[in-house]
Image: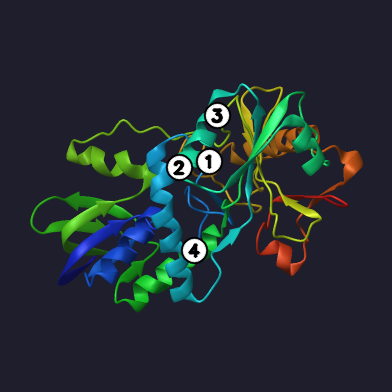
Amino acid sequence: MAAQKVLCDAIVIGAGIQGCFTAYHLAKHRKKVILLEQFFLPHSRGSSHGQSRIIRRAYLEDFYTQMMDECYQIWAQLEHEAETQLHRQTGLLMLGMKENSELKTIQATLSRHRVEHQYFSAEELKQRFPNVQLARGEVGLLEKSGGVLYADRALRALQDAIRRLGGQVHDGEKVMEIKPGLPVIVKSTSRSYQAKSLIITVGPWTNRLLRPLGIELPLQTPQLRCRHPLLLLLLLLLLFPPTIFVLVFLHEVKHGGVLLGQGAAPPGDHRCLVQGPCAPPCCCEQKQETEKGLFEQSLFLGLPSRQGQLMSTAPLSQEQAQYVPGALLYTIPSL
């Protein structure tokens, strides 16, 4: 195992969005930083993989809504530096019953912070979105600044920026041992590193790294299916051509809880984010097929097939595929 004799300012373990942004900001502040990732990049074994994520100001908690102003600025700055689009404003429509307390709280939070939004009564909602099948008494709240972040593209932009700023990104290097002290020593499968500081951003692998140090954090890996019985969350790409919804969408289904729409994993890609990391053989593929079936069921509850056509994105047009490869699209004749 080769040893790195140069003392760096910080080592960041985990190249998901948290680790990449941490290393990026350290490098921007002229710190010598090394970003370590156990898998070869890009990969689908963490919570930051995939083509898209929702970005919004619509939160129950004030502090999240407040922090989003700075978040939007940081994303815009990274877009400018990377010279590539990382964000698309689309609008975010939240559906719920009129008496839904969480919907009321979100509306109050948006109002307090003067975030542009629009409330739809049941009748107004039906007129504005005639292609969406609504439950009796369902109302809507449209947050106009909501949109999509292109997740994989953002990770690549950050990793490229780290290198441009003088930082190092080492993938395919699993951390085998951490020796606390000054300096802290980190041993990977390839070499040994020394640094003044260590930052760990490895999600469900955290306790696997900390346990040998006598530390265990009360962390739980959440299931992919979002159990939220109150709201139907539908992301509308209002700036796309008017025939397309991107299906990032929550809906109650018979099997309990609320289903989060997601794309299927590539063939042979063994991943299990339900229980944390795993290796083949495992039940991941079966779970993905189950999730896909439940998602299609929930889709038809919200957008009846008589008003459009459900299709797989393989193959999609090049323009569509850059936003939602591996996902499902629901085409609607008109909005």
Q: Residues within 10 Å of mark 1 (few under 14, many from 20)?
A: many
Q: Which residue type does callout 2 highlight?
A: Pro
**Secondary structure beneath disc 4?**
helix
Sequence-first disc among 3 and 1: 3
Disc 2 target residue = 277
Disc 1 target residue = 272
Q: CA distance from mark 3 to mark 1?
A: 35 Å
Disc 3 target residue = 104
- Residues marked 1 and 2 touching at CB (< 8 Å): yes
224 in relation to 38, above or below: above
158 in relation to 313, above or below: below
Sequence-first disc among 4 and 2: 4
Sequence-first disc among 1 and 4: 4
Answer left or right for 326 relative to 78. right
225 in relation to 91, above or below: above
Answer left or right for 110 relative to 177. right
Q: CA distance from mark 2 to mark 3?
A: 37 Å
Q: Residues within 10 Å of mark 2 (few under 14, many from 20)?
A: some
Residue at horizontal 59 percent and vertical 61 percent from the top: 88
State which quadrant residue 291 falls in: top right
Q: Which residue type does callout 3 highlight?
A: Lys
Tag shown at residue 154: 4
